[in-house]
Image (cartoon, rainbow, N blue to C red):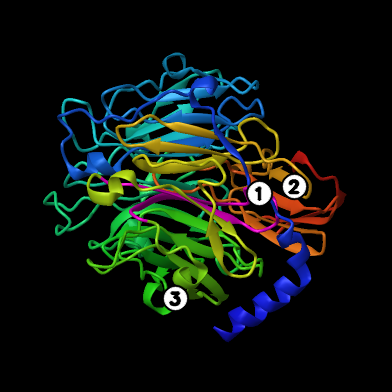
Amino acid sequence: MAGWRVSLCLIVAALGASVATAVDPVFTDQTVAAGVVNTFSPPPAWNTVAAEMAGGAVVADFDRDGRQDLFVLGGGDGPDRLFINNGDGTFTDQAVAWGVAATHLGGGVAAGDYDGDGWIDLFVASFGPPSGAVIGAHKLYHNNGDGTFTDVAAAAGVAMTNPDIPDGFGAAFGDYDLDGDLDLAVAGWMGDDGTQDGATRGNRLFRNNGDGTFTDVTAAAGVEDLDMHGFSPRFVDMDGDLYPELLMAADFQTSHYFINNRDGTFTDFTAQSGTGLDRNGMGSAIGDFDNDGLLDWYVTSIYNVQLSLTGNMLYRNLGAHVFEERSEAAGVKQGGWGWGTCAVDLNHDGWQDIAATNGWVYGNYLIDATRLYRNNGDGTFTDVAVASGLNHTGQGRALLTADFDDDGDQDIVIVCSREPLVLYRNDLSGPNTNWLRVFLDTRGAPSLAPDGIGARVVIRAGGRRQVRYISPGSTYLGGCEPSAHFGLGAATNVERLRVEWPDGGVTILRNVAVNQTLTI
């Protein structure tokens, strides 16, 4: 506690002026105008609790034209959609032409170039056809690079994650063994008896064999727990040793923090780390919320005092895999029935904010508002969602951020259960809103994972140091734009930009111009 207060005093003393002049973002609903109309709607045959919790989407540049596209699940009453960005504020659904317009009971989605051919592929967790759930229905869409995908899940060995029951929620690509190709973690919530009480065999870790196939190494890697009701996996290097940990937001107080042992195995360090306190871990966001250079972990959960449900948890990284839970003091605990969340600097003041969507099928949770917690730069946050135009009270599930219109600020997509998807455009303007957006290109470097996944990007601008980690893992059933996005406030120059690659290499740029998208 004392360390937190001292560090914040130093930060506020140095940066108080820029925080005081920060402006709030202004969001406008551009869903219809942008042409991204979609409703996640499960059919009557899918009448389990899983249907109410599903509804995923993911952001990636699938055609490599430099613009972020959007893949969205349909739910089973309608097909999945692939919205290709036209570059003029609109999108065109190309799912049929690209071969991904499947009608099925979709759970979650992850995007990543698993075979290193330069084209971003898709993993889709599925409960099966609309007529009824079946085991082994997941999809791995290989991007052929010609505007089409081919489902190779069965041949790749990732079509099934739970041998007992249809299952599959969030998923994440990441290179946990640092061999240069992307491995895959998939979360499973379902017990083998169809309830929360049964054994959960759906949480799987697949090692990429480098030949287009994967091997299930869950038990061998030490990450199998038959009591873990998983929702949102993330591969993130939390201690700076280059090897990413595996973090899993999971229900019924079964969230896990697995330390990477750097030998292909992990150690469950949840209790010792001070994490796993969330009663109903669902969504997951990673960010350096206090700008101390260490990555913190935010987990959404359910807040209900009468039922002793904890609410959201903010785990502040103290170093050496030890965390301090700060949600109540920070003002980000009472988020209703929490689901998708992202760490993102929405107003470009140099402090990462938190966006979190909510909702459930009864009581006050039916009109549970999405939160936009503005980082005040002093260890606290203020919900400015309504004031910023993010007035959303629908049944939010996945929440994603991306700069769809390439104007420098991050927009927000919310996927809802049985309600239309919403795209909020960020119309941030005014002084002290400079920015920098960095993508990493590792083509031609086989020792590095595609698109710089697992790299750390560190900048110094305006006397402030900021850190971002390239980890587009599950925020809840989907993933955000795989960039390092920085708000710079009044800074007119980035004095130093440092990329720390997962193989130990370093790239340094100096005097980088602001207000640009840069590819390194």
User: In screen coordinates, is 507 left or right of 165?
Assistant: right
The magenta span reads 336-360
**Crowdedness of circle 2 by 10 Å Cα count: few (<14), some, many (20+)?**
many
Tell me: residue 344, above or below residue 48: below
Q: Secondary structure at mark 1?
A: loop
Pointers 2 and 1 in contact (C-beta within 8 Å)? yes
Q: Earlier in the sequence, mark 3 or mark 2?
A: 3
Q: Residue at label 2?
A: 433
Q: Secondary structure at mark 3?
A: helix
Give residue 105's quadrant in the image: top left
Give residue 403's quadrant in the image: top right
Residue at x-position 66% and y-position 78%: 7
Q: Where is residue 312? Give x, y as percent.
A: 40, 62
Q: Where is residue 127? Give x, y as percent.
A: 24, 36
At label 3, which amino acid type do we have?
A: Ser
Label ID, residue 206: none
Tell me: residue 3, above or below residue 65: below
Residue most toward the left?
Answer: 193
Question: Is residue 427 found inside the magenta-colored segment of the image?
Answer: no
Find the distance from the CA under tag 3 to the CA under tag 2.
36 Å
3 or 1: mark nearer the eye = 1
Tell me: residue 3, above or below residue 123: below
Q: Residue at label 1?
A: 347
Tell me: residue 396, above or below residue 5: above
At label 1, which amino acid type do we have?
A: Asn
Residue most toward the bottom?
Answer: 2
Q: Where is residue 148? Give x, y as percent.
A: 48, 19
Residue at x-position 81% and y-position 45%: 514
At label 2, which amino acid type do we have?
A: Thr
| Residue in the foreground of this view, choosing between 112 and 300 | 300
Q: Where is residue 264? Give x, y as percent.
A: 45, 62
Label ID, residue 273: 3
